[in-house]
């Protein structure tokens, strides 16, 4: 009994599967008598190259031809069909690849055909020829005798020299579509009277990878294995392929976070080769992408990238079971990632909520808010009753962004200082009229000492960001549990470069205090001219009651004047 691949080998151009353009071109060339000296057929294995060469050779030899459809009844056609035509010479380029073999071939071209119209040389796997053999063939291939035709076939046309390609008519045989392969398999099974399932033929067509000869060989194997009833389950067992339902359950339990079921399906996948599991997963996700009940495109894209990275690990020689386990863990992590648009939206919402005033926080309990109002002093009631906006104005946002820029620049200048500055310094306000930046300091101990030592760095950055090089006054709002109303303005035209004296006489101390009071009075007058006046009674009362505190602040920060905002 003849094998199916030979029994159903095409005998005419109309029987070629998936190569309509090649069949049409060669048929028209035969009918119009527009024949070339040499033809080159290239393409995937099992795509019809050798079969086309034999059909073309028989069409040239037919007594009624040359024509596209040979009669198959004349002596020439019968001899060609039985593969013993004396003037059709088939040569394997893999085993006859040397220059001596080509010389013998060239010697045969000198003699006219013994039986047919032409002497036809069919050279299969011609890319296996040596460089010397190709060079010897060039002249004959370009200008052969009128009775000689060359039909070259190869699976890798890129290995042929350009000089050979330029002397032939090149026909490229494409990969045969799976639908055409399945249709051809159905025709064979109906002629052989074998029952089948279409899904089983789909698996066979996919395993054939576009090669019709390989697919028909698998079909014959499946007929024997399934005992003349080709079913999907039997074909999957024969091919060692993974059942689609296993992959369906695997991905569904992964998405549903069903750990127990996921582990069961993972245990089944461990029984197969890891490379075949990855290939089956890609096919499954491709089908899901085209189906109406698909997963999200973003999720499928992440899964594909994970599978491709796993394949690269396998090629580098990584342990197969480890790669499969890593694949599962990456799949689980991919479900936790957010889309870029969602992440941006969440970031914007967090940014807006950061600008929301504390006393307007929707999550804050109302009772605590009322209790804080009762604790406040009477002079604070006016501020508490003032209308408050839920969001910062555009101007305030600009100042906040400038302060963020100051933090970034401090980090770039000195990382340790930047960390302390971001941790302890809070932006309060910036007055563009008086060029005064107000912030609140939470620094204590070592942080406070570091800020004091390296304040020149911060001041230069503040001047550059807020003042564009001009001098900026910095107002310090002390963070205290008992006193929240005190704010100190420190003019930094003369930064902390003055060393603190170790000892002073009583006369020097009194003289210094007198000078500082005079400077303080002058500065107070200047501030009163540029800023709104406060109630004189409250100011005098505060200065009288907190003179010790003011002196302590002056000595600690080594400043010349202290003002109340």
Image: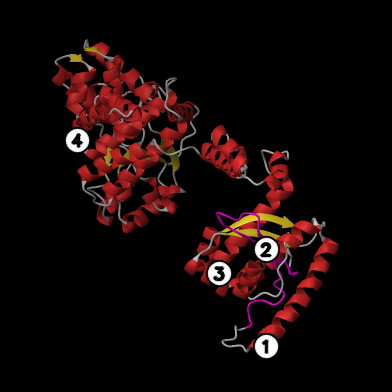
Picture residue at 22% right of the left edge, 13% below the top: 192
Mark 2 in CB contact with mark 4 (< 8 angstroms): no
User: Considering the image in quadrants, where does the C terminus appear?
Assistant: bottom right
Alpha carbon separation for disc pair 1 and 2: 25 Å
Check residue 181 for magenta coloring. no
Camera-near label (2 vs 3) is 2
The disc label shown at residue 508, or none = 1
Camera-near label (1 vs 2) is 2
Q: Where is residue 69 shown, x and y percent of the image? A: 40, 21
Alpha carbon separation for disc pair 2 and 4: 82 Å
Occupied quadrant, residue 404: bottom right
Picture residue at 29% right of the left edge, 53% below the top: 103
What residue does disc 4 label?
Answer: 270
Camera-near label (4 vs 3) is 3
Give the residues in magenta.
Answer: 469-498
Q: Is residue 278 left or right of residue 141?
A: left
Q: Secondary structure at mark 1?
A: helix
Colour scheme of the picture: secondary structure
């Amino acid at each position: 009994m003849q094998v199916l691949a030979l029994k159903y080998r095409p005998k005419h151009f109309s029987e070629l599967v998936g190569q309509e353009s090649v069949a049409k071109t060669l048929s028209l060339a035969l009918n119009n008598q527009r024949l070339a000296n040499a033809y080159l057929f290239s393409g995937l294995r099992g795509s019809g190259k050798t079969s086309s060469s034999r059909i073309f050779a028989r069409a040239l030899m037919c007594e009624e031809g040359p024509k596209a459809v040979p009669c198959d009844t004349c002596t020439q056609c019968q001899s060609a069909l039985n593969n013993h035509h004396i003037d059709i010479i088939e040569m394997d380029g893999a085993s006859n690849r040397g220059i001596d073999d080509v010389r013998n071939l060239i010697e045969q071209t000198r003699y006219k055909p013994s039986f047919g119209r032409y002497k036809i040389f069919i050279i299969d796997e011609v890319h296996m020829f040596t460089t010397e053999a190709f060079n010897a063939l060039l002249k004959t291939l370009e200008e052969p005798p009128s009775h000689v035709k060359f039909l070259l076939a190869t699976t890798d046309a890129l290995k042929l020299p350009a000089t050979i390609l330029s002397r032939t008519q090149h026909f490229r045989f494409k990969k045969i579509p799976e639908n055409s392969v399945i249709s051809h398999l159905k025709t064979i099974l109906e002629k052989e009277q074998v029952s089948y399932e279409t899904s089983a033929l789909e698996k066979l067509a996919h395993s054939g990878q576009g090669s019709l000869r390989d697919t028909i060989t698998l079909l014959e194997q499946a007929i024997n294995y399934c005992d003349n009833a080709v079913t999907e389950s039997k074909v999957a067992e024969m091919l060692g392929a993974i059942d689609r339902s296993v992959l369906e359950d695997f991905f569904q339990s992964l998405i549903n976070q069903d750990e127990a079921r996921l582990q069961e399906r993972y245990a089944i996948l461990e029984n197969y080769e890891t490379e075949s599991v990855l290939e089956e997963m890609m096919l499954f996700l491709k089908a899901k992408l085209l189906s109406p009940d698909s997963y999200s495109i973003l999720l499928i894209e992440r899964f594909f990238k994970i599978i491709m990275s796993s394949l690269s690990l396998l090629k580098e020689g990584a342990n197969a079971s480890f790669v499969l386990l890593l694949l599962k863990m990456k799949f689980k992590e991919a479900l936790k990632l957010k889309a870029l648009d969602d992440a941006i939206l969440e970031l914007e919402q967090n940014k807006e909520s950061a600008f929301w005033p504390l006393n307007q926080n929707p999550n804050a309990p109302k009772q605590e808010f009322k209790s804080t109002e009762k604790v406040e002093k009477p002079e604070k009631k006016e501020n508490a009753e003032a209308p408050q906006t839920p969001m910062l104005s555009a101007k305030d946002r600009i100042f906040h962004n400038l302060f963020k820029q100051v933090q970034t620049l401090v980090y770039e200048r000195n990382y340790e200082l930047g960390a302390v500055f971001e941790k302890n310094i809070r932006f309060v306000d910036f007055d563009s009229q008086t060029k005064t930046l107000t912030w609140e300091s939470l620094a204590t101990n070592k942080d406070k000492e570091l800020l004091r030592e390296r304040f020149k760095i911060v001041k230069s950055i503040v001047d550059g960001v807020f003042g564009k090089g001009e001098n900026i006054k910095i107002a310090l709002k002390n963070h205290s549990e008992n006193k929240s109303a005190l704010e100190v303005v420190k003019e930094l035209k003369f930064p902390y470069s003055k060393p603190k004296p170790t000892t002073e006489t009583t006369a020097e101390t009194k003289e210094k205090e007198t000078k500082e009071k005079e400077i303080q009075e002058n500065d107070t007058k200047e501030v009163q001219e540029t800023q709104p006046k406060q109630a004189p009674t409250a100011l005098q009362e505060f200065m009288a009651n907190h003179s010790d505190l003011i002196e302590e602040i002056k000595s600690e920060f080594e400043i010349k004047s202290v003002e109340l905002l």
